[in-house]
Amino acid sequence: MIMHRCAVIGVLDNGCDGLTPQAMKALASADVLVGGTRTLALFAPALKEGCVTHDLTGKLGLVPEWIRQAQQDGRRCAVLATGDPLCHGIASYLAAQLCIDAIDVMPNVSTIQLACARIGLPWQDMKICSVHTKDAGEWQEGCDPKHGLYALRQALALHDKLGVLTSPDNTPGRIARLMLAAGLQDDFHIAIAENLCSDEECIISDLSVADVAGRTFAEPNAVLLWRSRARAAVKTFGFPDSDFQQRQPEKGLITKREVRAVSLARMQLRRDSTVWDIGAGSGSVGVEAARLCQLGHVYAVEKNAGDCDNALANRRAFGLHNYTLIHAKAPEGLENFPDPDAVFIGGSGGELSALITLTIQRLKPGGILVMNFVTFENVATAMDALKNSDAEWDITQLQCSRSKPILDMQRLAAENPVWIVTASKRK
């Protein structure tokens, strides 16, 4: 028996007029056709008599089995997908479920490519995002990677042009409201492409982000975003202590710049690291970690309400999207954090031994725990806990002095010595 490869056909709303002869032949010869409700109705007149159709709406998990059954029966099968099936489309899912040799991908022009062509926007350097997922809910600053719009928020921070594939729930209006919440409404131009390649096609490019936030648009649609002003050049590391909002009038509840720099270096952060900041204080370590881990996320916990307010103010001042803070006394709340690549303990609230045991257990293989101490007692507690753990560890004592004016001269004023204890989880 001949087992036919399944044709995965990229389609647009101009129907058969938008298909190549090869794609048209695959459609017309299909014994089994899989597609969404709208595409099945659009191409119904082109199907051969007796063609069995399957509506995949809400049934994506059944599609591989429908294809397998058709192939086992020696029947020709085709799947209809919008635009380019390998650009946030169904083809990559089918290749993973069936293997690439089981399918023939016949791409069409992508909807993002079409939208850019309509307004003359070059797209070779564009970041393409999809929010075509289940209802993600409205975005709020501080949301973590579990939120369905997180990848889009991340892309807005890193890219100058974005093409966004929307969904009935994650609409242009919701995207615009995300931008308002993030303070990005004046940084981007926005355009919405409605009903591409249909008689109802409409391109809307004369609205502000604030205007879009309060409107609804015809479906299906796509959103284009491009910067109206260049991103400011920003530092990524080594900020002075004065850049951070701190407790007033009692300053000093902050990891000083020299200690912060060494502590961050010992954490061996990657761009995609997941970081815990326990006893965040003013948030200086977590804020700098979030800037270094642009593709990662920082989860911070702080028990003092006033310090939480300062840390949140610093998150806003540094324009961070990848920093989540909870008001709690650790280890409370840590059970909801994902396993970390690196942990910083700046304050323990009397729970140091338990926190060390917990973080060593939760660290990913090869993960790093860094702790700062200014008392002998805490160093001794940490050593006892680490001796009983499955970790390799070392201690660095850091003593810094800073210049201070004296009359028309300069002297050195010593900062408090700090012990930096670093532990690594064995791989």
Image (cartoon, helix red, strand yellow):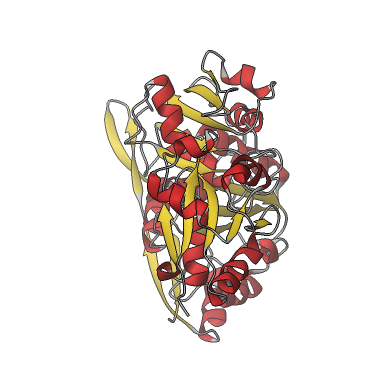
User: Image quadrant for the C terminus?
Assistant: bottom left
Relative placement, left or right, of 167 versus 341 is right
Q: Name above or below for residue 206 compared with residue 401.
A: above
* Residue 376 drawn at (x, y percent): 52, 69
Q: Name above or below for residue 189 compared with residue 302.
A: above
The residue shown at (68%, 38%) is: 168
The residue shown at (38%, 62%) is: 268
Classify residue 313 by image quadrant: top right
Relative placement, left or right, of 409 versus 176 is left
Q: Check the image and name the residue furthest to the front.
A: 49
* Residue 80 drawn at (x, y percent): 55, 50
* Residue 328 drawn at (x, y percent): 73, 55
Q: Looking at the image, can residue 253 be seen?
A: no
Nearer to the camera, 228 or 5: 5
* Residue 318 drawn at (x, y percent): 49, 35
Q: Looking at the image, can residue 308 be seen?
A: yes
